[in-house]
């Protein structure tokens, strides 16, 4: 039955009612923070404070930093569509959530989807108590002794990388991020799984193709990965996958094969695969944790997915800053040359002695944190210290690293690349928990030391032989790709490599 005698009028009325009802539904929680006397950023109809991210006009890190800069409150509320989220500004409150009151924030907000068992069982996404149990078992992989044992393997990849760069020196402009990605992929495959990925020997190396597939800039990937962090309900409703099925299948097949080949061998490599096999052979552990199928291979896949991108990005962004700052590059190369000579080559002791290299990498991680935000979920009602505000159970809590790392209060002239911020003298002045590139507390990055070792050694190999220079293709200033979950340049990191006249080798 028509509302009027004219169909166009009826259509307009029905559409208007539908839009009104949709608006009312999606704005039903917009009074949430006001009722609790919490400062909040005024939401927009339908999108809340999530419009720029929904339309992929900016990166998540940059958007949270923009919201961060709109208030001076220690914490404030936003809305992801209609869902209330709390954003933390105060380093003291960051410490409370990540360390002091960790037991109430021990799970990430990121979706753990039952339909995507490989990804949901990765350590990064896993929920307690399984997360804690697996983490305890995997931690011994990254002891100092184990890291020292990996040095010869990493150096092998470093030598291969130098030969590769030698061959591309005639090129006017080279994609540095791709070189770093080949290196980090080879390092992860060799050190964690005893697999030769051969990324420098073959442009179509399967491991590298899969790496590109996991963190590509396609719309489908952007929607799926953003949903995992901010719309976990949507992930389960539409059975969204974090990774392309081709990537999941490759990782599953490759690592199951690696596990089966290693089982029964008397000699151990003491790597990730051996740690997984030890868990698999512990009947009590397997029974209590249902440790089988994708739960097993997920622990190996975790280190590939998380490891190659973090190392390659940090290396790439460091080279980018060095090509823009020749003076810093010269000082760093001088240190590398001196330390390599003092310690007789690419040794663990030589790397540890390179203080300026450490300062440069730390400053890179300040300006370019690979995942520029941290997420947690409130387990039980929690009263924020020194306030009357209670965070309700289930509330997502986000810590905007970009906001903290670029806050002039903690890092004066934050756009400037200044390694001196992390000198022995100045590091004491940095406000605790204002600089958290690897997170903090019990759920910090388990592979931080391995990642730093791989990153530094890769940079040492490059800078001991080559100089990097800015070209007309080098982006300045840098723009970040809005469709990437991790921090990535919109146009890559092109620069010129040339042989150093003062080789540090």
Image: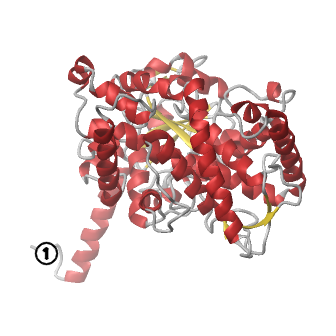
- The N terminus sits in image quarter: bottom left
> In terms of depth relative to the viewer, which is nearer, 329 or 391?
329
Q: Secondary structure at mark 1?
A: loop
Looking at the image, is 236 positioned above or below residue 397?
below
Residue drawn at x 50%, y 41% is: 191
Is 438 situated left or right of 261 in this image?
right
Q: In this figure, which residue is indicated by the disc labeled 1? A: 2
How far across and how far down the image is residue 475, in percent? 72, 67
- Residue 123 in view: no
Residue 205 can be seen, yes or no: yes
Q: Position of residue 257 (x, y in %)?
A: 30, 46
Mark 1 neighbour density, 10 Å: few (under 14) some (14–19) many (20 or more): few
Residue 131, compared with residue 333, is above or below; it is: above
Q: Residue 172's spot in the image, x, y percent? A: 74, 76
* Quarter where residue 474 is shown: bottom right
Single out the residue that lies furthest toward the left. Answer: 1
Q: Quadrant of residue 160?
A: bottom right
Where is residue 188? Give x, y as percent. Answer: 50, 45
| In the rendered image, the vertical position of residue 167 relative to residue 463, given as above or below | below
């Amino acid at each position: 039955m028509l509302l009027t005698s004219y169909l166009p009028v009826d259509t307009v009325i029905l559409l208007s009612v539908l839009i009104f009802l949709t608006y009312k539904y999606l704005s039903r929680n917009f009074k949430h923070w006001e009722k609790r006397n919490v400062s909040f950023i005024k939401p927009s109809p339908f999108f809340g404070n999530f419009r720029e991210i929904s339309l992929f006009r900016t990166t998540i890190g940059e958007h949270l930093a923009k919201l961060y800069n709109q208030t001076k409150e220690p914490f404030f509320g936003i809305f992801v569509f209609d869902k209330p989220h709390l954003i933390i500004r105060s380093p003291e409150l960051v410490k409370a959530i990540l360390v002091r009151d960790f037991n109430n924030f021990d799970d990430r907000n990121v979706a753990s989807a039952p339909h995507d068992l490989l990804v949901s069982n990765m350590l990064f996404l896993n929920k307690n108590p399984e997360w804690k149990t697996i983490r305890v078992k995997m931690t011994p992989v990254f002891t100092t002794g184990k890291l020292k044992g990996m040095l010869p393997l990493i150096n092998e990849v470093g030598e291969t990388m130098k030969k590769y760069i030698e061959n591309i020196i005639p090129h006017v402009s080279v994609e540095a991020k791709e070189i770093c990605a080949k290196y980090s992929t080879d390092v992860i495959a060799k050190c964690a799984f005893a697999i030769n990925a051969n990324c420098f020997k073959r442009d179509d190396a399967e491991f590298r193709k899969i790496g590109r597939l996991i963190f590509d800039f396609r719309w489908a990937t952007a929607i799926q990965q953003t949903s995992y962090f901010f719309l976990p309900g949507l992930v389960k409703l539409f059975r969204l996958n974090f990774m392309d099925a081709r990537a999941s299948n490759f990782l599953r097949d490759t690592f199951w094969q690696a596990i089966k080949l290693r089982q029964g061998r008397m000699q151990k490599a003491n790597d990730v695969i051996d740690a997984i096999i030890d868990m698999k052979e512990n009947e009590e552990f397997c029974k209590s944790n249902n440790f089988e199928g994708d739960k097993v291979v997920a622990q190996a896949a975790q280190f590939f997915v998380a490891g190659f991108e973090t190392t390659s990005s940090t290396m790439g962004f460091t080279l980018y800053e060095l090509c823009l700052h020749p003076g810093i590059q010269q000082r760093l190369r001088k240190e590398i040359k001196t330390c390599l000579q003092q310690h007789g080559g690419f040794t663990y002791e030589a790397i540890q002695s390179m203080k300026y290299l450490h300062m440069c990498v730390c400053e890179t991680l300040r300006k370019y944190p690979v995942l520029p935000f941290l997420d947690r979920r409130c387990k039980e009602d929690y009263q924020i210290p020194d306030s009357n505000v209670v965070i309700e159970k289930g509330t997502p809590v986000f810590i905007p690293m970009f906001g903290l790392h670029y806050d002039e209060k903690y890092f004066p002239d934050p756009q400037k690349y200044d390694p001196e911020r992390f000198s022995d003298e100045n590091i004491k002045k940095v406000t605790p928990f204002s600089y958290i590139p690897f997170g903090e507390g019990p759920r910090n990055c388990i592979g931080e030391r391995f990642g730093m070792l791989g990153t530094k050694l890769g940079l040492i190999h490059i800078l001991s032989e080559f100089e990097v220079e800015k070209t007309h293709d080098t982006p300045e200033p840098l723009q970040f790709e809005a469709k990437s979950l991790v921090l990535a340049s919109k146009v890559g990191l092109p620069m010129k490599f040339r042989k150093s006249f003062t080789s540090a080798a």
